[in-house]
Image: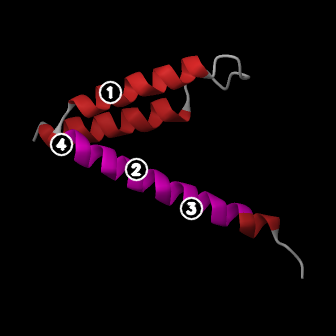
């Protein structure tokens, strides 16, 4: 049986995107109940980075930062209406 790496990669990408959407929705829901959740999440991400300081660095702005910014924008949009 031949394995199609393109299909496998596309499947993994769809799963990761779905998980990210679920996490963004969940964080948004939690932030609606307590806006401090976003600040706490940022602090935890910073702490996790510090804990991983000896690992090879990724790029300057991580994917985690990008997701948090998206959640913040959505939170501000919903609460400024």
Q: In the figure, is residue 62 to the left or right of 25?
A: right
Q: Give me the residue at 54% from left, 35% from top.
A: 63
Whole-angstrom CA distance, mark 3 to mark 4, is: 26 Å
Q: List x then y, in percent, for residue 81.
A: 10, 41
Helix, strand or loop at mark 1: helix
What is the spatial separation of the Cα atoms under label 2 and label 3, in whole angstroms? Answer: 12 Å
Query: Residue 70 in the image: x percent, y percent?
Result: 37, 38
**Foreground residue among 76 and 38:** 38
Q: Residue furthest left?
A: 81
The residue at the far right in this view is 1
Return the disc, 3 or 1, that comes first in the chain's sequence.
3
User: How far is the residue under mark 4 from the one under mark 2?
Assistant: 14 Å
Q: Residue at x 81, y 65 (%)?
A: 5
Q: Image point 48% across, 20% down: which residue? A: 47
Q: Are marks 4 and 2 in contact (CB under 8 Å)?
A: no
Which residue is labeled 3 in the image? 15
Upstream in sequence: badge 1 or badge 4: 4
Lower sequence index among marks 4 and 2: 2
Q: Residues within 10 Å of mark 2 (few under 14, many from 20)?
A: some
- Where is mark 4, residue-wise? 32
Q: Nearer the viewer, residue 8 or 41?
A: 41
Q: Quadrant of the N terminus?
A: bottom right
Residue assigned mark 1: 40
């Amino acid at each position: 049986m031949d394995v199609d790496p393109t299909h496998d990669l596309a499947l993994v990408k769809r799963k990761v995107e779905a998980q990210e959407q679920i996490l963004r929705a969940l964080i948004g829901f939690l932030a609606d109940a307590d806006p401090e959740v976003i600040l706490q999440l940022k602090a935890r991400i910073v702490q996790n980075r510090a804990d991983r300081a000896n690992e090879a660095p990724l790029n300057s702005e991580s994917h985690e930062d990008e997701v948090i910014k998206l959640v913040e924008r959505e939170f501000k949009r919903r609460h400024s209406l």
